[in-house]
């Protein structure tokens, strides 16, 4: 009998299943190396399937295996996973890890009320800045890796005609489409149509040069499609948008998507839409919200890059002790999407 203990959270509605002591860990000197090893390791991938697939999970489940960091400069490392494999980045998961690390005492809360939890992820080193009021966690700022627009106004042939997308990196590579350009709104009633178009755009671009990372091929591939509504500016001059991020192969982020929001910030900054000091008020299809801003700028690989900061909160939803009976004919489970 195999048993696995998990601690579960949600960030703005998106699940994050934390495995603090995974029974199998891939080899590798860095988290990026371990991700590549995990992809090829049947035991590690089997653990992912066990915790993500039905009947213990579902097609939109998300989680992470805690690993050692790359070096003493970080508090922990993490391998992010979803129904189709291991991702290079996850903002909502980083926010959840920050809350978990402080709640469990893995990273002691700073008396100042602000505790930095430094995490090595496959795309680099990120920070979950956890804010506390006494013993209560009241917010987390996710400070991501440099993010930048890779291409703009890229034509993609789809079943609804040619569409034009921007492509940007925010720890993972995303295509961005204004939903109104294809007669859609980001509302639950359009959920099925949004998923179908998001999948179509991802796979149309994934084998092209637009999917290649300019510096590290381990980060290549179109991770997802961000379909957004532009809701105009707020009275304070901030940008207000709503999005659905369709990633992997048809999986939907219930939150506004942490790394996707960073990618969105990169597009808006490059287009001159997000003024210095302004905030992106970013809503999800279920009505939850992140606030994001640019905290620094730099030149990287010939691109104008920004350091994004995304603010949100995660809540603990419970713990699990999962089991796999060797006689179970379903084994590690199944998915229906």
Image (cartoon, rainbow, N blue to C red):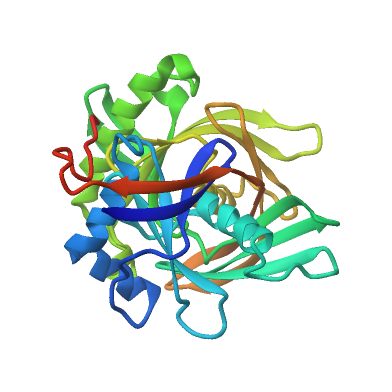
Residue 224: x percent and y percent? 36, 44
Q: Residue furthest top?
A: 189
Instruction: Using residue 247 as the reference point, say whether residue 257 is left or right of it.
Output: right
Instruction: Using residue 31 as the reference point, say whether residue 334 is left or right of it.
Output: left
* Residue at (22% x, 45% y) in the render: 332
Residue 287: x percent and y percent? 60, 27
Badge count:
0
* Residue at (18% x, 44% y) in the render: 331
**Residue 152 visible in this rendered orientation of the protein:** no
Residue 328 vertical position relative to residue 145 in the rendered view, above or below: above
Instruction: Using residue 22 as the reference point, say whether residue 143 is left or right of it.
Output: right
Residue 85 vertical position relative to residue 239 in the rendered view, above or below: below
* Residue at (72% x, 40% y) in the render: 238
| Placement of the C terminus among the 4 image quadrants | top left
Q: Nearer the viewer, residue 159 or 99?
A: 99
Image quadrant assignment for residue 131: bottom right
Residue 63: x percent and y percent? 42, 51
* Residue at (78% x, 65% y) in the render: 114
Q: Nearer the viewer, residue 117 or 46?
A: 46
Residue 34 vertical position relative to residue 179 in the rendered view, above or below: below
Residue 190: x percent and y percent? 41, 17
**Residue 268 visible in this rendered orientation of the protein:** yes
């Amino acid at each position: 009998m195999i048993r696995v203990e998990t601690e579960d959270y949600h960030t703005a509605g998106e699940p994050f299943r934390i495995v603090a002591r995974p029974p199998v860990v891939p080899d590798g000197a860095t988290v990026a190396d371990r991700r590549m090893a995990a992809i090829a390791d049947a035991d590690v991938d089997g653990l992912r399937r066990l915790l993500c697939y039905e009947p213990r999970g579902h097609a939109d489940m998300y989680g992470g295996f805690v690993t050692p960091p790359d070096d003493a400069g970080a508090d922990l490392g993490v391998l992010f996973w979803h129904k189709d494999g291991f991702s290079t980045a996850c903002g909502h998961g980083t926010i959840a890890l920050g809350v978990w690390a402080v709640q469990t005492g893995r990273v002691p809360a700073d008396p100042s009320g602000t505790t930095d939890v430094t995490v090595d992820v496959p795309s680099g080193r990120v920070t979950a800045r956890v804010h506390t009021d006494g013993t209560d966690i009241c917010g987390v700022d996710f400070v991501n890796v440099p993010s930048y627009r890779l291409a703009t106004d890229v034509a993609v042939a789809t079943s609804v005609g040619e569409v034009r997308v921007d492509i940007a990196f925010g720890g993972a590579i995303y295509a961005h489409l204004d939903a109104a350009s294809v007669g859609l709104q980001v509302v639950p009633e359009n959920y099925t149509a949004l998923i179908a178009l998001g999948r179509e755009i991802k796979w149309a671009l994934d084998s092209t040069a637009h999917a290649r990372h300019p510096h590290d091929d381990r980060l290549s591939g179109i991770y997802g499609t961000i379909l957004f509504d532009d809701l105009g500016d707020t009275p304070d001059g901030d940008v207000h948008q709503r999005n659905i991020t369709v990633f992997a192969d048809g999986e939907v982020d219930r939150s506004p998507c942490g790394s996707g929001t960073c990618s969105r910030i990169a597009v808006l900054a490059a287009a001159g839409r997000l003024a210095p000091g302004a905030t992106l008020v970013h809503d999800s299809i279920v009505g939850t919200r992140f606030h994001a801003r640019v905290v620094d700028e730099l030149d990287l690989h010939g691109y104008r890059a920004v350091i994004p900061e995304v603010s949100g909160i995660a809540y603990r939803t419970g713990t699990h002790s999962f089991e796999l009976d060797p006689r179970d004919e379903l084994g590690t489970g199944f998915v229906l999407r």
